Amino acid sequence: MVDVNKIRQDFPILERSIYNKPLIYLDNGATTQKPRCVVEAISEGYYNTNANIHRGVHFLSQEATEAHENARKRVQKFLNAESSDEIIFTRGTTEAINLAASSYGDKFLKEGDEVILSEMEHHANIVPWQMLRERKGIVIKVIPMNDKQELDMEAYRSLFTENTKFVSVTHVSNVLGTVNPVKEIIDIAHSHNAKVLIDGAQSVPHLKVDVQALDADFYVFSAHKIYGPTGIGVLYGKKELLDAMPPYQGGGEMIATVSFDKTVYNELPYKFEAGTPDYIGSTALARALDYVEDIGLENIEAYEAELLEYATSELKQIPGVKIYGNASHKSAVLSFLINDIHHYDMGMILDKQGIAVRTGHHCAQPLMSALGIEGTVRASFSFYNTKDEIDMFIRGVKRAVDMFS
C-alpha cells in the first residue's frame, strides 16, 4: 500500500506553484524529484564526511571510503548481484553503456561481428554502438516492433547468425512504456553464445530487478531516475567479463603500480573507476534505494499501474487522441498526440497550467521514424502522483484541445 499523502511530504518541490498554479510534475521519465533524505545525505556528506577516498590514512578519508563502499554493497543488494566487485560506479546510464561498448567491444568484437539493438532504444543505446561500428566495422541489426509497439520476438530470433556476438536492449521504453521480455531476450541470445546488456534506466524505479535471475551479462541504470542525485549511475557486469575487459579510462585509482615502462591495473571494481569518484553521490544513491525499498517496489509497481490505467482511460475519452505504446505489459508512461496539435504547443499550454510533461522525440528519433511521427507528448508517473493530479492533467489537455479547435 502506497500512502501517497505521507510520501508527498518528503518532496518539498511538490509544494511549489508554477504560474500561480500548483505544480503537477509528470516528467518522471526524464528525472524524478528527490526526497528530503537524499538531499540530506548529500548535505551530511559535504558537511561531515568530505574527504577523498581510498588514499588517505586520516579519519575522514577512512569514514568516507567506508560510506562509499557500503553504497556499492547497497547497489549489489538492490540488483542481487553476486559480488560488490561487479558494481561499477559511472556518471550514469549513458557512460555505463559507453564503457561496455568501448571496453568489451574494442577487445572482443571484430569486423563483421553483429550487435542487435531494437527500434525502441534511447540514443544512449544506439550511438555508442555506431561509434564502435566506425572503429571496428561491426554490423548493427535492429529488432522491429509489432502493431502494439512490442518487440517482435520472432523477428528477433531470425536476426541471429553465427556472427551475432552481442545484444543491447532497453528493459522499459522511455517513450512507449513497453516492458520488454528481457529474460526471454537474454535466454535466446545466450543460446547463440551472444552477450547481453540491458538498459535499466526506466525499469529500476518501477520494477524489481534481479540480475542473477535474469542472467544479464551487463545491466545499467542512473541514480537520478530512481530518486537519487544526478551525475552518478551504475554498470553491473559479470565478474568474469569485467576481469577480461581492459580499463575504459586511465588515471588515478584504476592503477596498482605505475612506471614509465609499464602500468599494472587495479583489481575490480576500481579498474573501471579512474579518478576521484562521486563518493557523495554514491551515498545519496544508497539512501534513495533505501527509500524506494522502504515503500516497496511491488507496492510502487501496483500503485503506478493504477495511475496509468486511470490516466489512459480518461485520456482515451478525448476525441482525436492517439496513444503510442499499447503493449500488454506497460510501465507508467503515457505518450500521445491529439489531432494535428503539435506536441510542443500542447506542452507549452500544459506548462502554463503548472503541468510539467515532456515533449519531442525523447532521445529516440529512430523510434519516432518507425512510428511515422516527429514527437509526442509524454506524461510519466511516479508514486508521489495522484489521481487528482491526473484529473487536472486531463482538464489541461482538454483546454488545449478547445484552444486549437
Image (cartoon, rainbow, N blue to C red):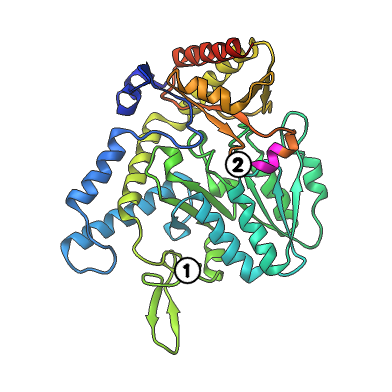
Foreground residue, 1 or 90? 90
Residues shaded magenta: 364-368
Foreground residue, 150 or 347? 347
Q: Quadrant of the C terminus?
A: top right
Considering the numbered disc 1 on the image, is that residue within a helix, a strand or a loop?
loop
Picture layout, residue 4 above or below residue 395:
below
Residue of label 2: 171
Residue of label 1: 249
Between circles 2 and 1, the one closer to the viewer is 1
The answer to if 366 sits in the magenta stretch is yes
Picture layout, residue 39 above or below residue 382:
below
User: Is residue 215 among what the camera can see?
Assistant: no
Q: Residues within 10 Å of mark 2 (few under 14, many from 20)?
A: many
Quick one: label 2 or label 1, which is nearer the N terminus? 2
Picture layout, residue 334 above or below residue 50:
above
User: Is residue 47 among what the camera can see?
Assistant: yes
Q: x, y percentage for residue 101?
A: 60, 61
Q: x, y percentage for residue 295?
A: 39, 29
Query: Residue at (35%, 35%) from the top-left corner?
Result: 34
Foreground residue, 101 or 378? 378
Task: Give the amino acid at mark 1.
Answer: Gln
What separation in Å lies between label 2 and label 1 (alpha carbons)?
Answer: 27 Å
Q: Which mark is residue 61?
A: none
How many numbered callouts? Answer: 2
The answer to if 241 sits in the magenta stretch is no
